[in-house]
Image (tube, rainbow, N blue to C red):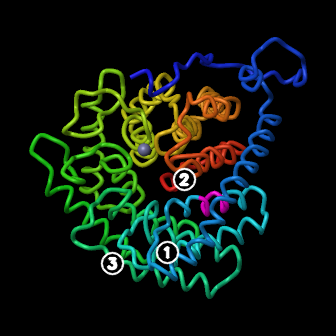
């Protein structure tokens, strides 16, 4: 199990040294970062985030070119993670107001649009809805009304089929998240309530149909397994439903589902990957395990104001602190994604110990990720530049750490 993560030997809190930023000490470079005043550290996050963004963007620009050729020759080629680069460029534009980033973001979305036009994938993270939603929001910032209308009309063309699942990566809740993202960034009603209600109704209906007496009030299946985590399971679906105006009985079922998970978590505070795999306390990822569930529980505290959810989120964060320094860098199952657990708890509680922990995970990446990857001690990701698996996620976290009070887990926290 220990080969999945580095033992976390960082102190549980380090006070920032306000006075002596440039002092010469024997401390190692990571400890120096941890004690650095935040104003100086955030400049380092910004510099490294923007440098990494440049590297990630260069690889995606070859995709833009290749996608035109491949689309002309073969038709659909898929977005293969490139929409994540567009999202990173949009984030960078938000931080620096550099219009070049916005322009490149729109170019990549355009290539993803061509590459995915025949795709049946419907979600924000893996499908057409992400292309349309990000395209419309970026076009709004570029004051291009025709392009906004184009992407919104393309969203309206997406068909949810009976055999689409309900989970976040490929299913209804992932489509719904794109609609909520649009309404947040372009104004309520951009996607009509009737559309949102219809999808939410279907998700609730399917969840109730698979629920068993005495178990969770809502249950879902993906490829024959009843997952619990953010990517394919209960946590991801509940996370999206918590942003919809549900009826009281529906909210009760969402609440009951989260309580079912809390009541059946591992003694360590971690969560199983699925109903079928209730014994192996192994994964501490956003996709499977405590991190994704903790983010959903933080949202539940905001909706229900229930202390039980806060306690469970803090317990899950403790698991992330102890076993979440993963040997990967990305958002999905890497250190970058896990850092967002502390950021969301910091935003909820104002407790700077959580901010410190987010900072510690980020500084670990800043100080060591490149060296550890080069030495073969850390995995660079199957797609090394992608947002969910690779450097793209790390760049996004660095940029989010410039203003931690506004950080949001990309494509998960609205
Ligand atoms: Zn993952």
Q: Residues within 10 Å of mark 2 (few under 14, many from 20)?
A: many
Look at 37% across and 32% down and name the residue there: 283
- Report the span colored magenta: 85-90
| Residue 306 horizontal/vertical position (percent) | 38, 38
Q: Residue at x 35, y 61 (%)?
A: 170
Q: Does the stretch in magenta take in 87?
A: yes
The residue sitting at 29% across, 61% down in the picture is 247
Q: CA distance from mark 1 to mark 3?
A: 18 Å
**Residue 17, x across and y down, in percent:** 81, 21
Secondary structure state at the residue bearing disc 2: loop
Could you tell me residue 289's position as x and y percent? 37, 36
What secondary structure is the magenta-colored segment mainly?
A: helix
Toward which corner of the image does residue 109 lie, by quadrant?
bottom right
- Identify residue for label 3: 159
Front-most of 302 and 71? 71
Observer able to see residue 82: yes
In this view, the residue in front, 141 or 283, is 283
Q: Earlier in the sequence, mark 1 or mark 3?
A: 1
Question: Mark 1 touching mark 3, by CB under 8 A?
Answer: no
Q: CA distance from mark 2 to mark 3?
A: 24 Å
Q: Provide residue 12's location: percent of width, then percent of height.
A: 60, 18
User: Which residue has dot 2 on it?
Assistant: 410
Which badge, 2 or 3, is on the more N-terminal residue?
3
Q: Which mark is residue 115?
A: 1
Where ligand 1 lies, by image quadrant?
top left
């Amino acid at each position: 199990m220990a080969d999945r993560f580095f033992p976390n030997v960082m102190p549980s809190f380090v006070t920032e040294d306000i006075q002596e930023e440039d002092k010469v000490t024997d401390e190692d470079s990571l400890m120096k970062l941890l004690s650095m005043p935040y104003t100086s550290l955030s400049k380092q996050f910004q510099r490294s985030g923007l440098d990494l963004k440049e590297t990630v963007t260069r690889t995606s620009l070859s995709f833009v070119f290749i996608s035109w050729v491949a689309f002309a020759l073969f038709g659909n080629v898929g977005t293969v993670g490139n929409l994540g680069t567009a999202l990173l460029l949009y984030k960078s534009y938000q931080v620096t107001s550099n219009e070049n980033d916005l322009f490149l973001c729109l170019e990549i979305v355009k290539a993803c649009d061509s590459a995915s036009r025949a795709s049946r994938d419907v979600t924000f993270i893996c499908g057409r809805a992400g292309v349309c939603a990000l395209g419309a929001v970026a076009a709004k910032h570029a004051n291009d009304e025709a392009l906004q209308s184009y992407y919104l009309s393309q969203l309206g063309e997406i068909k949810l089929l009976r055999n689409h699942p309900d989970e976040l990566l490929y299913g209804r809740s992932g489509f719904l998240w794109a609609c909520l993202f649009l309404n947040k960034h372009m104004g309520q009603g951009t996607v009509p309530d009737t559309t949102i209600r219809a999808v939410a109704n279907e998700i609730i209906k399917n969840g109730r149909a698979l629920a068993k007496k005495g178990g969770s009030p809502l249950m879902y299946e993906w490829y024959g397994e009843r997952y619990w985590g953010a990517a394919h399971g209960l946590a991801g679906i509940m996370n999206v439903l918590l942003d919809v105006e549900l009826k009281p009985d529906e909210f009760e079922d969402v609440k009951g589902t989260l309580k079912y998970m809390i009541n059946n978590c591992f003694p360590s505070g971690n969560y199983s990957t699925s109903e079928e795999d209730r014994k192996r306390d192994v994964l501490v990822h956003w996709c499977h395990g405590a991190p994704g569930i903790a983010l959903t529980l933080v949202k539940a505290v905001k909706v229900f104001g229930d202390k039980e959810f806060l306690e469970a989120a803090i317990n899950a964060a403790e698991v992330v602190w102890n076993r979440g320094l993963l040997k990967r860098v990305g958002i999905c199952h890497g250190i970058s994604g896990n850092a967002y657990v502390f950021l969301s708890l910091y935003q909820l509680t104002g407790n700077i110990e959580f901010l410190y922990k987010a900072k510690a995970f980020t500084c670990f990446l800043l100080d060591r990720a490149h060296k550890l990857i080069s030495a073969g001690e850390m995995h660079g990701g199957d797609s090394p530049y992608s947002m969910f698996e690779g450097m793209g996620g790390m760049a996004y976290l660095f940029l989010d750490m410039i203003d931690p009070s506004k950080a949001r887990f990309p494509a998960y926290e609205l």
